[in-house]
Amino acid sequence: MPTIKDVARDSGLGVGTISRYLNNKPVTTENRLKIAQSIKKLGYERNELARGLKTNRSFVIGVLIPDLTDIFATMLVQTIEQIAYNHGYNTITCDSRGNDALEREKIRLLVRRDVDGLIVFPSNDSAANEAYGKLDIPLVLINTNITDSLYDTIRSDDFEAGKQAGNNFYKHGHRRVAIITQMRNRPGYLRAQGFFSEFGPSHDPSLLYDGEFSIDDGYTAMKAIMESENRPTGVFTTNYYTTIGALRYCREAHIEFPEDISFIGFDNIGAIPILGPPITIIEQPIVDIGKQAVSLLLQQIEHPDISTRTPIEMLLKTRLVIAESVKTI
């Protein structure tokens, strides 16, 4: 089996340089490339057990999400795994299936596996407060709205995302715009609040379509909107799945944007780009959320002063991508 000395000999670099590379210490770009090529050529594999005994770490990060079938969560996990791997860490990913009890069980499982830290997308905020209140382990919470959290949190600025959509409609002359959301879901609630804040202190409650973040509910809500007597001039969907459902109905009913109605969707991922002409849409910074989550966690792991540090709350801006699905009226 190739050794670190073999890698040094093949790359023409010193053992110290190879060691710095393997332990994620600063190495020039040129040397990093040489080392990576030699490792691949020789089939060198680092002895993780020996590495762990030396550093008292497992070099494994636990990742817990509420639903592996959710495209946002899946893309987030892909980013986290890649960034963690680039820093010398592997990941174990678990799915809580949106169940609070199972979430706590999975957390205990990951802790028993001696992971160095956890990145968790909680199933709901109230359960998260109870589940993570006494954990003595580096932890980053994603897309949670827990206030006064003991741990670092990172999420999209959902209120601002709603404002971006509302402002775009308002400046194009729209005053009656429907929104399809899920009010019991904190991000959905905040997106709705931000959206309506652009239309003044009061809004027509009939313009709020509250349901599940699902394709079926998006479809049903869009159908109801288009069949209503006092049809609004535009529609804003606040989630990937409701956007898919609304677009599916419009495709079946031969509804065109913006000729028949103006439209702004959410999360420009998955099937949305292929469901028709480009639409104006809110993009969440999925890759940035994953990168920052790993960065925050590694700071805790490598500087274990959890008891004295102040938890970080990071809000990342969404982006309004303009197409031609909103007309001026």
Image (cartoon, rainbow, N blue to C red):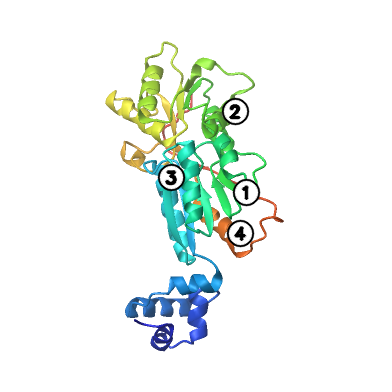
Who is closer to the viewer here, 181 or 68? Answer: 68
Q: Nearer the viewer, mark 2 or mark 4?
A: 4
Which residue matches tag 2? 198
Residue 119, image x, y percentages: 52, 51
Which residue matches tag 1? 151
CA neighbours of label 4 inside 10 A, class few (<14), some (14 to 19), many (20+): many
CA neighbours of label 1 inside 10 A, class few (<14), some (14 to 19), many (20+): many
Q: Is residue 302 above or below residue 161?
A: below
Q: Which residue is rendered at x = 38% and y = 75% of the image?
A: 45
Who is closer to the viewer here, 262 or 128? Answer: 128
Task: Say which element carries label 2.
Answer: helix
Residue 11, image x, y percentages: 41, 85
The Cα atoms of the two marked residues, 3 and 1, are separated by 20 Å
Q: Nearer the viewer, mark 2 or mark 1?
A: 1
Residue 104, image x, y percentages: 50, 43
Task: Say which element carries label 3.
Answer: helix
Which of disc 1 and disc 4 is earlier in sequence?
A: 1
Are discs 2 and 4 less than 8 Å apart at CB? no
CA neighbours of label 3 inside 10 A, class few (<14), some (14 to 19), many (20+): some
Q: On the rendered image, what quadrant is the N terminus found in?
A: bottom left
Tag 2: residue type?
Answer: Glu
Q: Is residue 329 above or below residue 3?
A: above
The Cα atoms of the two marked residues, 3 and 4, are separated by 23 Å
Tag 1: residue type?
Answer: Tyr
Which of disc 2 and disc 3 is earlier in sequence?
A: 3
Which residue matches tag 3? 73
The Cα atoms of the two marked residues, 2 and 1, are separated by 33 Å
